[in-house]
Image: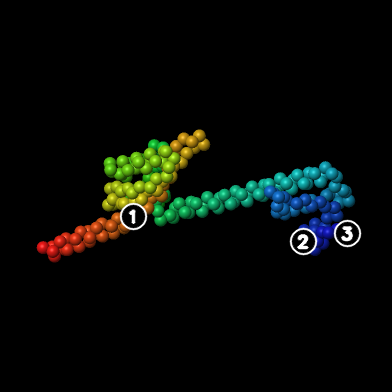
Amino acid sequence: ESNLNKNNPMLQLLKPKVIIVAPLTSRGTVTGDILADRLPQDGIFTESDKDFIVSFANQIAIALDNAELIRQKEESEQHLRNMFENAQVGILKIDDLNIVRAANPRMKVLCGADSLVGRHVYDFLDSENQMKFQQIIARNRAGNPSQEELEIQSKKKPPVSVLMSSVPTFDETGKYTGSEAIVTDISDNKKMQRQLIQSQKMDAIGKLAGGI
């Protein structure tokens, strides 16, 4: 007596007399089945037929598994692209010559530029901040992360105080290939610090004047 479900829609539609069912197995998990009919229906499946069906089922399972991995990879890449495009901090990738290779929209806003790719980082730094940036890259080239306050210069807007946190990137041979950085606008914090210092100075002057 067959253990097949006679109410299965496919069996009811095709009404096979002789069938073989092989599992679709990938990485130890059964994800489905493949059902094969034989014509003429009064024939029988040979061992060669069975081997072929099992091999075919394995190939289909691998193809389906690869398709799922590709789908997951595409979803992950899309998620990363969305984060890159919508991040509220600047994201910067430079090569070993300090040429910008990637920059998100927020980074463009901080630099007051419509496009950054292909430009040298020094285009947005004065001589003092170029020296600070050199120290950042020196630490990165040595294999260390770095964090430093910089001031970005732009012809379109006032200077912007930022905190640059960078990590180095290396190729498979260990050669330094550039750096990736998160750039955070700290202008408001710096403004508050200046206001606090000014307030403390005025308070000190008031106390000194009151003591005369």
Q: What element does badge 2 sit on? A: helix
Q: Mark 3 or mark 1: name the one nearer the start of the chain.
A: 3
State the scheme by which the image is colored. rainbow
Q: Residue at x 79, y 52 (%)?
A: 21
Where in the figure is residue 169, as x and y percent of width and height?
46, 41
Q: Mark 2 or mark 1: name the one nearer the start of the chain.
A: 2
Task: Let me know if residue 101 appears in the view.
Answer: no
Q: What element does badge 1 sit on? A: loop
Q: Is residue 28 left or right of residue 111?
A: right
Task: Let me know if residue 66 appears in the view.
Answer: yes
Nearer the observer: mark 2 or 1; the answer is 1
Q: What element does badge 3 sit on? A: loop
Q: Which residue is mark 3?
A: 1
Q: Is residue 60 left or right of residue 200?
A: right
Disc 1 residue type (three-letter): Ile
Q: Residue at x 37, y 42 (%)?
A: 136
Q: Quadrant of the C terminus?
A: bottom left
Q: Tag on residue 9?
A: 2
Q: Residue at x 40, y 53 (%)?
A: 89
Disc 2 residue type (three-letter): Pro
Q: Quadrant of the N terminus?
A: bottom right
Q: Which residue is mark 1?
A: 186
Q: Mark 3 or mark 2: name the one nearer the start of the chain.
A: 3
